[in-house]
Image (spheres, rainbow, N blue to C red):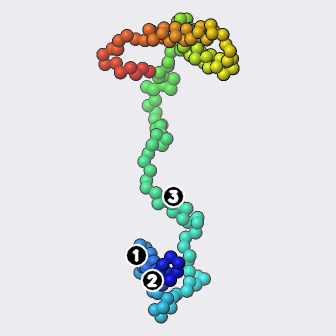
Amino acid sequence: MGPRGQEPNESTDDAVWQDLVARLEGTPANPAPGNGTPQPEPGPNDDAGPTDRERADAIFRNQPLRRSGPRDHVVPESDDDEGLEPDEGFVPEEPPPLGAGDPLTILAWIGAAGGPITLLLFALFWRDAPLAATLGILALFLAGAGYLVTKLPQHRDIGDDGAEV
């Protein structure tokens, strides 16, 4: 006996393992080396199995048929293209220029977004900023945010889910 208890029987473990592998592979079990039947020796002409290239080809060859998708669409060529012109279709209107808008709303957005950023920069780089500057920026932030909240719609239309394009 070893320090951990009883040693496993090597021959029994090997036979059980070979039997398990044979049952999983669905092939008959190899005879044990002590049965007196000689093991066939692989000859030089025996095929060792498919090559790496054959295995890689088999992976792609044995796939199920692919469904057609949007990239497989082919526009049919027809002589009856009189009704459809390639230039027809939806043409969006020109967007308004970026500077065009309600000046109060633009200033409110500057105050609501710029106020906290400016206060953060004061906290990082200008620790002894005057109290009047800090309170002024805080007041601009509150005024801008308050104005934007008052500009929100007061009621929702019946059946409107709020989604807009």
Q: Are marks 3 and 2 in contact (CB under 8 Å)?
A: no
Q: Are marks 1 and 3 in contact (CB under 8 Å)?
A: no
The residue lying toward the viewer, choosing from 157 and 95, is 157
Q: Residue at point 33% right, 14% down?
A: 157
- Tell me the CA gap for discs 2 and 1: 17 Å
Residue most extreme to the left: 158
Q: Quadrant of the C terminus?
A: top left
Question: Which mark is on residue 12?
Answer: 2
Residue 149, image x, y percentages: 45, 11
Mark with earlier residue (2, 1): 2
Element class at badge 1? helix
Which amino acid type corresponds to the residue marked 3 in the rendered image? Phe
Residue 52, image x, y percentages: 58, 66
Element class at badge 3? helix
Which amino acid type corresponds to the residue marked 2 in the rendered image? Thr
Which amino acid type corresponds to the residue marked 1 in the rendered image? Arg
Residue annotated with mark 3:
60
**Residue 34 vertical position relative to residue 50 in the rendered view, above or below:** below
Residue 71, image x, y percentages: 49, 41
Residue annotated with mark 1:
23
Element class at badge 2? helix
- Left or right side of 160 for 131: right
Sort mark 2 into few (<14), some (14-19) or many (20+) by Cα contacts within 10 Å: few
